[in-house]
Amino acid sequence: NKFFCSLLKAEKPFTLYQNRFLYCGLKEKNVVAEVGAQYPNFLLGPNGEATFEFQAYYGPKIISYLNGFDPGAARVMHLAWGPLDYLARGLLWVLVALHGLIGSYGVAIIVLTLVVRGLFYPITAKANASMRKMQTIQPKMKEIREKYKDNPQMQMSKMQELQRTEGVNPLGGCLPILLQIPVFFALYATLDGAVELRQVSFLWAKDLAAADTVMTIPLYFLNLPINPLALIMTGLLVVQQHMTPMSVDPMHKKMMLAMPIIMLLFLYDLPSGLTLYWSVSNLFSIIQMRLQRRHYNDQGTKPAGASGK
């Protein structure tokens, strides 16, 4: 399953035996999966004997344990799909190494998140700068849309001409972010599938592999868990969205503003190790955008979206 596995190996090759049976307990019934090794029928003569030797592993999906059992056993470690799985394993190795140095998986997650975000700092800064430039020409873009609304071909030509004149690349804010997505997906998969985080506490979270529920509010139709890290993650995302340069398109603004609510609904029950990662990542983004705004102010340029107060 997600955190544990059962492995069986033998010198003599065997075929997989699988069966399912119904187990009736005192209060409930469960379907139990039965697996093992199966050999073809054979005959033994008088006083004959046959020996079958097996080795079995029943335990957590920890790469060092699996490699100790068999060099190929680590293949059961399936953190992500395709090439991302190799990247996720590398990040898991770094996480375990950081824990060995620091002694806390919670702090190790924070450090790993900061290291990854720090490595992508120049790329993210370039994307933010591109979005800021795009924001500054939005009023002119709107004028072109209104002026040539009956001539789409001329409208597109004028918009491209404006972008070339202002030195704005419409993909400049997207491509740098796309380069980061595989790493962040791999890091997400690492924190979601690491058995090392199971039943490990940090701050108020009792288990980094489960939601950090501190209390439950009984309602008429459900019990509402209170998960502080998920709420902190959402609050930081709202601040980040407020600081991010947005398009003047009303529909685009509504979609961006609705994103924190959507993420809260879908990610509310995430393991606390993941919500800790998202919270630190969002805080890093806020600090980075704040530093970039200060840099532009030092250069005598008013940041896009800044008020005149």
Image (cartoon, rainbow, N blue to C red):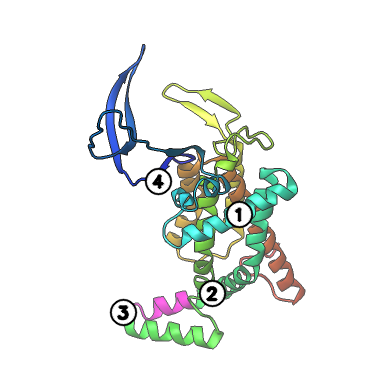
Percent from the top left, x then y, of residue 277? 60, 49
Q: Is residue 307 visible?
A: no
Foreground mark, 4 or 2, reads 4
At horizontal 70% and vertical 43% (from top left) the residue drawn is 104
Q: Which residue is labeled 3 in the image?
A: 150
* Secondary-structure class at tag 3: loop
Q: Is residue 297 left or right of residue 66?
A: right
Residue type at tag 3 = Asp
Q: What secondary structure is the magenta-colored segment mainly?
A: helix
Q: Quadrant of residue 144?
A: bottom left
Q: Which comes before the other along the chain, label 4 or label 2?
A: 4
User: Can you see residue 232?
Assistant: yes
Amino acid type indicated by mark 4: Glu
On the image, the x and y values in percent for residue 170 come to 48, 76
Residue kind at label 1, given as amino acid type: Trp
The stretch drawn in magenta includes residue 221: no
Q: Is residue 98 above or below residue 304?
A: above
Q: Is residue 169 above or below residue 95?
A: below
| For marks 1 and 4 on the same chain, the one whose residue lies earlier in the sequence | 4
Mark 2 and mark 1 lie on one chain; the one further toward the N terminus is 1
Which label sits on residue 93?
1
Tell me if residue 201 comes above or below residue 275 in the rendering: above
Q: Amino acid at mark 2?
A: Met
Viewer-nearest of labels 1 and 3? 1
Report, in whole angstroms, how far the alpha carbon at label 1 lies from the one at label 4: 31 Å
Which label is found at residue 11?
4
